[in-house]
Image (tube, helix red, strand yellow):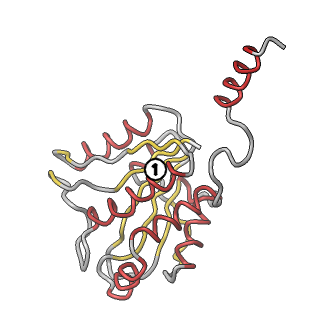
């Protein structure tokens, strides 16, 4: 698969670090997102890092994220976020609230870690969901201002959260564990051609 991963918000500039509570959103999106990228790449998937660390405005930040995502064909675009507002649990936003397999699985995998499953919701009004050409989902891991969520997140660690999201995206399969990719097929044809059979 070719997957775009965005660590939400910026670490500096006008948009700042997103939600701030017991933890800071932009710091934690990078803790989870960078690990997710590494896990997916180790499993043989092509991953495009669509993270923007500095922007002069929120609109500039969002436009840059979408530009990076749309610069090549992706099978899936994933934006990592943390929520605020005193709620509990995880939720995933998709265009039109589509319950595609990766979104449903992300809710289920995070729920299996102990987070409340808030379900798949309509994210059509979210810029990165609406403007990204690929199938997309925005994952809200947990609430930065709810002690029980933050305590669970700290107990699990960013690595385990990233692993859960990766499992949701890939179904636990490594690239190449199933059918041959087009590139592998072309390389095999070239090798066979060299044998002059």
Identify whether 148 is placed above or below 48.
Answer: below
Residue beneath the point at 39% across and 81% down: 87
Q: On the image, which quarter does residue 173 sit in? A: bottom right
Most foreground residue, 194 or 174: 194
Residue beneath the point at 24% across and 42% down: 60
> Mark 1 falls on what kind of element?
helix
Q: Quadrant of the N terminus?
A: top right
Identify whether 94 is placed above or below 113.
Answer: above
Most foreground residue, 178 or 83: 178
Residue 15 screen position, x and y as percent: 20, 55
Most foreground residue, 108 or 118: 108
Task: Determine which residue is flagged by label 1.
Answer: 129
Residue 18 screen position, x and y as percent: 25, 63
Question: Is residue 161 found left or right of 59 in the rendered image?
Answer: right
Residue 189 screen position, x and y as percent: 74, 21
Residue reaching furthest right? 197
């Amino acid at each position: 698969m070719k997957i775009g991963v965005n660590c939400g918000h910026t670490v500096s500039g006008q948009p700042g670090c997103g939600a701030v509570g017991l933890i800071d959103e932009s710091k934690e999106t990078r803790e989870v997102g960078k690990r997710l990228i590494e896990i997916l790449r180790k499993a043989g998937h092509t991953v495009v890092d669509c993270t923007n660390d500095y922007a002069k405005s929120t609109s500039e930040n969002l436009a840059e994220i979408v530009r990076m995502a749309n610069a090549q064909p992706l099978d899936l675009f994933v934006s990592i976020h943390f929520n605020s507002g005193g709620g509990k649990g995880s939720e995933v936003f998709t265009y039109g609230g589509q319950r595609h397999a990766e979104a449903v699985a992300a809710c289920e995998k995070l729920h299996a870690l102990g987070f409340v499953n808030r379900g798949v919701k309509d994210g059509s009004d979210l810029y990165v969901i609406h403007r990204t050409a690929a199938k997309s989902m925005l994952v809200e891991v947990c609430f930065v201002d709810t002690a029980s969520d933050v305590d669970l997140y700290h107990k699990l660690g960013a690595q385990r959260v990233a692993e859960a999201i990766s499992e949701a995206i890939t179904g636990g399969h490594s690239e190449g564990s199933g059918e041959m990719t087009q590139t592998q097929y072309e390389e095999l044809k070239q090798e066979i051609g060299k044998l002059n059979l």
